[in-house]
Amino acid sequence: MQDQKTDVLVIGGGPAGSMTAKWAATQGARVLMIEKRQEIGSPVRCGEGMSKEWLQDVGIRAGRWINLEVEGARIYSPREKVFEINEKHAGNEVGYVVERDEFDKQLAIDAANAGAEVKLKTAAVAILKEQGRVVGAKVKEFGQSYEIRAPITVGADGFESQVGRWAGLPTNIATRDMDTCLQYRMTNVDSDVRYCDFYLGKCAPGGYVWIFPKAEGVANVGIGVQVSQVKNPADARTYLDRWIEHHPGYAKGKKIDMVGGGVSIAPPLKQTVTDGFMIVGDAARMIDPLTGGGIANGCIAGKICGTVAAAAVHAGDPSKEFLQKYEKGWRARLEEKLYRNWLAKEKLVTLSDETFDKVIDALDGVRLEKLSVHNILKAVRDKYPEVTKEFEAFL
Amino acid sequence: MPNKKSLHIESSGQLCIYCGACVGICPLNCIYLDETRITFDEQVCTRCEICVKGCPVGAIEIG
């Protein structure tokens, strides 16, 4: 296979990659996006719940990827006291359950329609460097090796990113900064299509159990467990199976699908650009450390990344100084919330079941004008002042 | 040099679900996921066992 040249090489065809490709192509750059699998969006490795308030900003249209729209979220404490978050006080933060494979395909179609080339079954196997600058990647397409040279290379290769490390960015992750996740698609269960449900406490150490409804009686039932709290191999599966066993509305259900994966619960990378290279999405640890959601942040950063990539091409300047526009742009948009939620998560993973019960109990029946950590803690202080001692820093 | 512990990833499809969690957490970048095949670089692996903890279904054994 002959070596190729392009302006922007995007490695990975998930949401962050497609958004980067679309926005770089829209602004006149030649873009090549490579995906190692034969199908964009498959296999799905996702809980499929996401917020919706950000979609319009980044130019994503409604489509058949919307599985259903929920009215709210219910958070269950260990003794199963419930706090309901609805659209009124969460704004558009509650949102959709999605068909993730359809979502990824629509974003890839948008990228292709904007002018990006897409290559399937094409994996990056090494990063090309010249005088310390990234100048493309060595790839394998259907087993054939060749080089793709580009002034700008973007790593959008997901949680298990290799290209970030190859490019020289420190992407290593500690066991305390990662949740190991497992999810079943279950049928014949008592899920409620109006709600996404979250179960907190020792049922999922350092994480939570989620129920995202897919249809009447069908739901994604999953768990995340902080890797540093894993005692035995397969704890994620053991905890999830135990949770299901203890909930008759789910124990009677049948499993029809299973997915697993890792989710980072770390603060974002300190550095996301180097000469000729940017990293975006889950690969850049942009996953929300509190919720584990990565799609919104990946798409928002992808738009900024694609825009800066095109600008760098037009300016003929792929230096890391120029690419700081991306570094600064995505941080201005996302970093404050990422750090705030990281701090909240750091606290939550230390709470006892008893404290979780008190927090959720204090919220029961309280009408919050706006859902924020600050408002939640004020409500808790009114009922259980001793509990808020642990949270002084947030008040 | 002491013998390294033997390394075994169950990838015949009986336990491994090819999710890539081990790939993401390996501090030495020595685990590779290629569709439905997981491989280790035996020379690089130090048997730190972090991947054993990161695997949601217990498919990795070191012993």
Image (tube, rainbow, N blue to C red):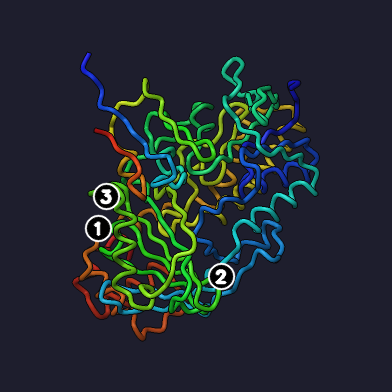
Visible in this render: residue B37?
A: yes
Residue under the point 60% across and 72% down: A68
* Residue position for label 1: A350
| Residue A345: % across, % down | 35, 57
Find the distance from the CA under tag 3 to the CA under tag 1.
15 Å
The quadrant where residue A361 appears: bottom left
Q: What element carries label 2?
A: strand
| Residue A393: % across, % down | 29, 59
Visible in this render: residue A347?
A: no
Crowd band around label 2 with a 10 angstrom C-alpha radius: few (<14), some (14–19), many (20+): many
Chain letter of the residue carrying label 1: A
Q: Nearer the viewer, residue A70 or A379?
A: A70
Chain letter of the residue carrying label 3: A
Circle 2: residue type: Gly
Residue under the point 67% across and 37% down: A34
* Residue position for label 3: A230
Relative vertical location of residue A276 with respect to residue A251 in this rendering, above or below: above
| Residue B21: % across, % down | 42, 44
| Residue A394: % across, % down | 33, 62
* Residue position for label 2: A95
Mark found first going from the N terminus, 3 or 1: 3
Mark found first going from the N terminus, 2 or 1: 2
Q: Are marks 2 and 3 on the same chain?
A: yes
Q: Are marks 3 and 1 on the same chain?
A: yes
Crowd band around label 1 with a 10 angstrom C-alpha radius: few (<14), some (14–19), many (20+): few
> Mark number for residue A58?
none
Q: What element carries label 3?
A: loop
> Please, which residue is most extreme toward the bottom here?
A365
Q: Which of marks 3 and 1 is in front?
A: 3
Circle 1: residue type: Thr
